[in-house]
Image (cartoon, rainbow, N blue to C red):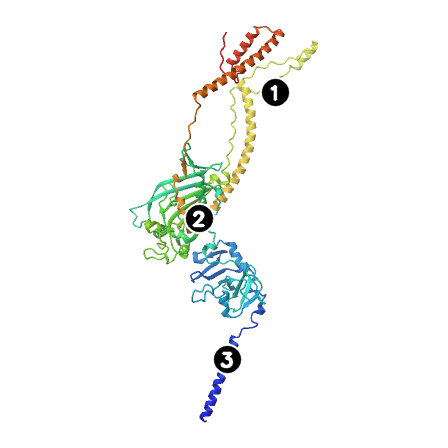
Amino acid sequence: MSTESLKTMLFVGMAGIAALSAGWSYYANRPPQTTGFELVGQPFFENFDDSRTAAYLEISALDENGDLQTFVLQKWQGIWRIPTHSDYPAEAVERLANVSTALIGLTREAVVGRIPDEHRRFGVRDPKELSFGDAEAAGTRLLLRDESGRTLADLIIGRAVEQGDLAVTDTNFSRPRRNEFYVRRVGESQTYKTTLNLSLSTKFSDWIDTRLIALEAPEVVGLKIDNYQLVNNPRDPLGTSRFKQTVDQVNLMQTESNRWEMQGLDVTKERVKEGEVNDLIDTLLNLEIVGVREKFRHQGKALIGADMRIAEIPELKQDDEQFGRLLQSVALDMSRRGFYLQAPEQGGDVNTLQLISEFGQVAFTTNEGYVFYLDLGKSIEGDSKAIEIGSADMELDGQTSDVPVDSEKNLDDEPAATKPKSSGKNRFVLIRVGLDESRVAGGPPQKPTPPIAPTKPEGYTPALAELKPQTDAAQDKKEDANQDDAPPPVEAIPQRDAAFEKYDQDVLSYESEKIQYEINLSRYEDALSEYNAAVEEAKTKVAELNERYGAWYYVVSALNLENLRTDRSALIEKFEVPPLEGPTDSAVKEAADAIEMQGVDAATDEAKEKASVGDQKTDDGDTGGTQDDQVENDLIDDFVNNENTDGIGRFEFSF
C-alpha cells in the first residue's frame, strides 16, 4: 500500500474518532428536556406513610466556619435519645413529630433544575460530599431510617425560594409563597421547589428541654442558700476529701400573705428585700442546660443514687474490695467536676453519703412539698461542642476530654487576672429532689380528739322522770271524803345533790360530743386516706425526677449564676422606727381646757334635764329632798359610778 493511501486512511480514521467524540459529548451534555417533569406532583417518598416507623434521624449541615456538623437521634425502648450526648433523652417531642410529619406526603411541586451544575445555585449540594467548606452551596441533609436500617427518607433541603430567583416567564416558577424551599432527593440530579414547614438544627439545645427546672416562680415558697468554704483534708492523698466550713446561710420562707420572712431576722429593725428575693428565684428558675456529662457507671448501673444512697448491687456485695475501688472511682469522677462525697452523717443512715460542692448549695421548696437541691460545682470554658459533651479543645495539664476527668478547664482555680471575661457563665450542677410531706396536699389532716366521759359522782342516783301520785287506795279515800277540789297529794321526794344534777347535764353534753366526734373521725379517715394517696403519688414523682436528674452532671449557663451565691446582707435592709412626737405643753393645756369646758357644758345640760325630771316626779307626788338636792345627788352618783359622764371633764362639788 502506498504512502498516500496510508495517509488517506489515517485521516479518515481520525475524522471518524472526532465525529464519535463530538456526538458522545453532545449527547452526554445536552440538558434532559423531559427528565423530572413526569414526577411533578408525585411524593418524594411514596413508601413512607407512617411516622411511627421512624427510629433513626440524622441531620448534617455545614456551620458558619464550613465544618461539617452531624446530629443524630435514635429511638431506643420507645424513647428518642441523642447518642452523641451519652444517650441523653431528646425532649423536644413536638420538633421530632414535625420532622416525620413534614416528610410524609411531601410532593414535588415544580422542577427548577435538572443538572448537577445547578445544585450550587439552589444550595442543594450534599454537605457530606463537599471537600471544602462551601456553606452557601451546601444544603441540610435529612436522613430517616426504620429500626432495621431501611431508608425511609433522604432529602437535601436548600435555600428558601425568593422573588427574582428565576425569570417570571419560566412556566415552572410562580410567585414564591411562604415556606417554599429548593430541595433534592439524594441520588437524583433534579432540583424541585416545594412547600416545607420544617425547622432543622444540629444544636443539642434545640432538641432538649433546656430548662433545668420546669417550675414557675409562684410555686416556690421556701429558699435556702448555703454558702460555705471547702477545706482540704490533709490526710487524704487523693485530694477528694474536704471539709465544709459554713460562712453564711440564707433561709427564707413565704408567709400566707405571700411575704418573705428570713430566719433570724430582727423584725424591729430589719426587713427582707422582696424584689431581690424574687429576682433570685427568677434567676434560679431560668437556668438553662447547655451541656451534659453522664455520671460514672459500672456495667450501666449507677453506684450512688441521686439521693446519695449507695446502690444495692448483689454481685458487687460479694466483693467488698472491688466495690470499694468502684466507689473511689465515683468519688474521683465527681471531685473533678467540683463535687465531693463525705462519710454518712453521724447517727444517720450508714448507706447514705453526704455531698458538698465547690460553689455551695441552693435549695428551694415548692407549695406541693417538692424540695430541689442544686449543688454548684466547678466552672468551665470552651467552644459549643466542648461545653455540650467535652472535647479535645478543652485541655488542662495536657489531658484531653476523651477521659471524663480534668478535660474541662476549671476557671475557679485560675487567678482572677487570668480568668476570661466569660468566667462563671458555665458551671457544673448536680440536682436532686426530696419531699417535705408536711406540704403535700396542704399537710396531713388533724385527727379529732375524742370527748372525755364525765366521772360519775359517788353515791349517784338517777333522777326520777316525774313525781309519783299517791296510791289508788289513797285516791279512793280522798274521793270518799268528798275532796274533789283539792289537788292529789304527792310523795315527798328528797332534794338531789347538785353534783348529780351537773353529772346528768355532762352526760347529755358528752353524748352529743360523741356523735359529733364519730362524724369528724369518719371525715378524718377519708381525708387521711386521700392525703396518704397524695404522698405516695408525690413520692413516685420524686423518684421519677431523681431518675431523670440522677444520671447526669449538667452544664448550666446563666449570666448571673453567681447571684445564687448571694449572702444574707444582700437580701435584707435595716430601718429605724421614728420616735413618736408628743404634743407641746401649751397644746396639752389648750386641749385640757377645751375638754373641761365641754364637760361643764355637758354637765349643765344634763343638770337641766334632770331638774325637769325632778319637777315631774314632785308633781306626781314623789317625796324626797328638794329638786336641787336631788339633781346634785344624781350627779354625784353618776360621777362616782362612772355613769353618764361621757365628754365630762373635771368637776368640783361643794356640799
- State the residue at coordinates (45%, 42%): 278
- Residue count near mark 3 (Cα–Cα under 10 Å), binned few <14, some 14–19, many ≥20: few
> x, y percentage for residue 245?
34, 42
The residue to which callout 3 is attached is 22
> How many discs appear?
3
Residue denoted by label 1: 465
Residue 153 image position (x, y, % from top left): 52, 63
Q: CA separation, marks 2 and 1?
A: 79 Å
Does residue 595 sit above or below 313 in this rendering?
Answer: above
Residue at x-position 45% and y-position 21%: 587
Residue under the image location 60 percent in, 11 percent down: 612
Q: Amino acid at mark 3?
A: Ala
Q: Amino acid at mark 1?
A: Ala
The residue to which callout 2 is attached is 287
Counting residues from the start of the chain, the first of labels 2 and 1 encountered is: 2
Whole-number angstrom distance, CA of label 1 to CA of label 3: 136 Å
Residue 461 is drawn in which quadrant? top right
Q: Is residue 411 above or below residue 124?
A: above
Can residue 592 be seen in the rendering of this structure? yes
